[in-house]
Amino acid sequence: MVIPHSYVAALLMTILTMMCWGSWANTQKLASKEWRFQLFYWDYAIGVFLLALLLAFTLGSSGAGGRGFESVPAEQILCFQYSDVSPQPVTGVARPTDRLPPGKGVVQWRDVLGLLSEKGYTGYLSYEAPNPAQWARSPYDVAREGVQLTRMLLRDSVPSYAV
């Protein structure tokens, strides 16, 4: 999905969309007089579906991992809430409960915490533990483990960190 970030970009995308509305039907007229309109429509619909499927699995997988919030200024980050993600995350649920302690999953913490440091972020870090295995433990132990692991990751990711 493309989300325009300015009025001008939204207006240009709207104009482009309006220009393309009838282009596939007009292309059918150019392609062949023998090809029925319904077949051309199905060919178009399947092509759009396959392209959308291809983009769904490839478009978001480019770029530098852990730097998805690179364009957000530090002043706009009120609190950084975090937990790690399992290599086989649960899907199809409204609120996942398979999150892991920091450093125990696949999040690229060196990139994430390094970016926060580059931005000059000095706000709150808030570890969340939505996982039934964590809920069964003492909240003090869960919090202590989260603080220890976070400090270890900060020492590894932020050269100026010293605690």
Image (cartoon, helix red, strand yellow):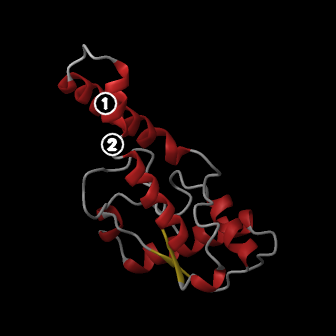
User: Is disc 2 surrounded by few (<14), some (14 to 19) or many (20+) residues within 10 Å?
Assistant: few
Residue 6 in sight in this render: no
Q: Amino acid at mark 2?
A: Gly
Q: Is residue 92 left or right of residue 147?
A: left
* x 56%, y 75%: residue: 147
Q: Which label is found at residue 44?
A: 1
* x 43%, y 51%: residue: 86
Vertical relation: 109 (above or below) 53? below
Q: Which label is found at residue 22?
A: 2
* x 65%, y 65%: residue: 153
Tell me if label 1 and label 2 are in contact, CB under 8 Å.
no
Residue 123, image x and y in percent? 61, 86
Which of 162/84 is in front?
84
Determine which quarter of the picture holds residue 69: bottom right
Quarter of the image with the C terminus is bottom right
Determine which quarter of the picture holds residue 93: bottom left
Which of 88/31 is in front?
31
Label 1 or label 2, whichever comes before in sequence order: 2
Q: Residue furthest right?
A: 160
Q: Amino acid at mark 1?
A: Tyr
Q: Is residue 76 left or right of residue 46?
A: right
Q: Secondary structure at mark 1?
A: helix
Residue 53 in sight in this render: yes
Residue depth check, mark 1 versus mark 2: number of the one nearer the observer = 2
Q: Is residue 12 left or right of residue 95?
A: right
Q: Secondary structure at mark 2?
A: loop
Vertical relation: 23 (above or below) 124? above
User: Is disc 1 surrounded by few (<14), some (14 to 19) or many (20+) residues within 10 Å?
Assistant: some
Q: What's the CA distance linking mark 1 and mark 2?
A: 12 Å
Q: How many marks?
A: 2
